[in-house]
Amino acid sequence: MMKKGMNWLLGIGALVCWMMLSVSQMANATSTTNLLITDTINRRVIEVNPITHNIVWQYGQTGVWGTGTNQLSCPYEATKLMNGNVLIADTENNHRVIEVQPTGTSGGTIVWQYGQTGVSGSGTNQLYCPNDVQKLDNGNVLIVDSNNHRVLEVQPTYPTGGSIVWQYNGTSSESLKEAERLVDGTTLICQGSRVMIVSSTGTTRWSYELTSPTDAKKLLNGNILIADNPQVIELQPIGTSGGTIPNRVIEVQPIGTSGGTIVWQYGTGTSGSGVNQLNYPFEAIRLANGNTMIADGNNYRVIEVRTTDYPSFTAGSIVWQQGQIGISGSGWNQLGVAVKDVEEMWLGILNQVRVEYKNMANVPQPVVTAWVFMPLIPALPPVLEVTKTVSPSGTQTTGTMLTYTIAYNNIGQGTAIDVAFTDAIPAGTVYGTGTAVIATGPTGTIAYSHDGISYNGVDSTPVTHIRWSIPTIGPGVSGTLQFSVTIK
């Protein structure tokens, strides 16, 4: 699923979407990406080369509001789709979401639009200040229709319009700023001072109270990364109460129906541009390399922060930056007021050649460089969830046979390969010969260790360890492994 990327800020700002990314290695030029930036105040969406900071594609005429060809009003979010098109939320005066097929280095063709240009409303094919959009795996589009206080899932009909197939209705007293469809079909929403997960029927499954959250993303480890002005925090949701510290990005691990524990944070809570300081962070993502990318809104920058101090609440070092602190503009390496979004989508490989030469007078000439970029679509990761139980449970006596069951489930989107489960025979027990089995799920092999080091197929006492090897576990596949011991 490709995450959209966009948040809300009184109609001003710039939104940034990472198209292909691993910029912490930028100095070595081994893996890189372009940036897709929604430069709201300059009324344009631009694609920027992060090495040169040059604009390589632009939609919208710089500083020109309009409804015509290659014109935008207040673009709030832009995301690059797998087909190469760009999905844009063009809010306020234009009240529309458009899909643009880029042409050359500037402009493009609108191939789909939802919302009537210049018309605000809640009727058929109408929006009122859409400020967030996400293309779903099923081809539908998730739209935060901000001033109508609703989230819509629209099934597009080309070239315009579509059918609303799902809707979440908020309240008029709380602004909707962000929505992301999760893999289990629920939706993560920033509403008012809360981050919440709602079911397909609109029931709140989980919530966390903050100050002014503008962005939230669920991580592969189950935690939630939240931008709460002006800090970034990783929260482990536990218990039933939340927190109210502003100005941060946090990672939360959600457990139960509300609240949680903060397990990582960037930002002290005081606005600024110094070490471990942010000024209205609108968006944060956890990168594949473990770093965190932050759209630091009112500092006019996007920064990549190391998380080597994780899980402590100390600041990491900034290893890359786009934009100049305190300078709002439309020139080279400049962004408008309030950068509002950053998003990791694709990986790529950059290969660069450097040429040095001299003229006939032996005078060095200007160095020439050239590079080629190969985009890569990352493999969706597997995520194995494992639990272990024993029967009978509770206090037992000598001579009792215990049966251990290991249950696993691949809750991720990719296939796990060469999976090995290794379990030690508990101290004070004797392994029951012939009891180690693959009870359910994919087939595999079982090996035994008699010294804790080497393994073979001999299933006889004394067994110290058991290893189950399963070649592949696909998405949604589950199974159980079992063995029995007798208490000495």
Image (cartoon, helix red, strand yellow):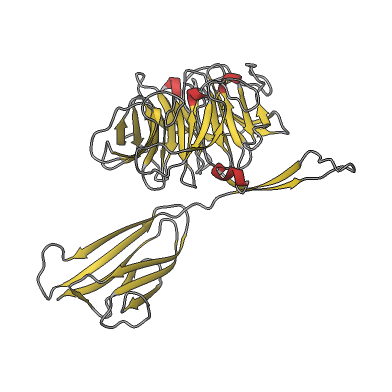
Residue beneath the point at 35% across and 38% down? 313
Q: Looking at this rendering, what residue extends furthest in the front direction?
A: 362
**Residue 77 in sight in this render:** no
Res. 212 image quadrant: top left
Res. 245 image quadrant: top left
Q: Looking at this rendering, what residue extends furthest in the right direction?
A: 360
The image shows residue 90 at horizontal and vertical percentages of 56, 24
Please determine whether, in this image, residue 339 is positioned above or below residue 352. Answer: above
The image shows residue 366 at horizontal and vertical percentages of 78, 38
Residue 438 appears left or right of 81 = left
For the C terminus, give its image quadrant: bottom left
Residue beneath the point at 43% across and 26% down? 177
Q: Nearer the viewer, residue 288 or 167?
A: 288
Total marks shown come to: 0
The image shows residue 470 at horizontal and vertical percentages of 42, 68
The image shows residue 380 at horizontal and vertical percentages of 50, 51
Residue beneath the point at 60% across and 47% down? 31
Q: Nearer the viewer, residue 6 or 30?
A: 30
Res. 149 image quadrant: top left
**Residue 321 in sight in this render:** yes
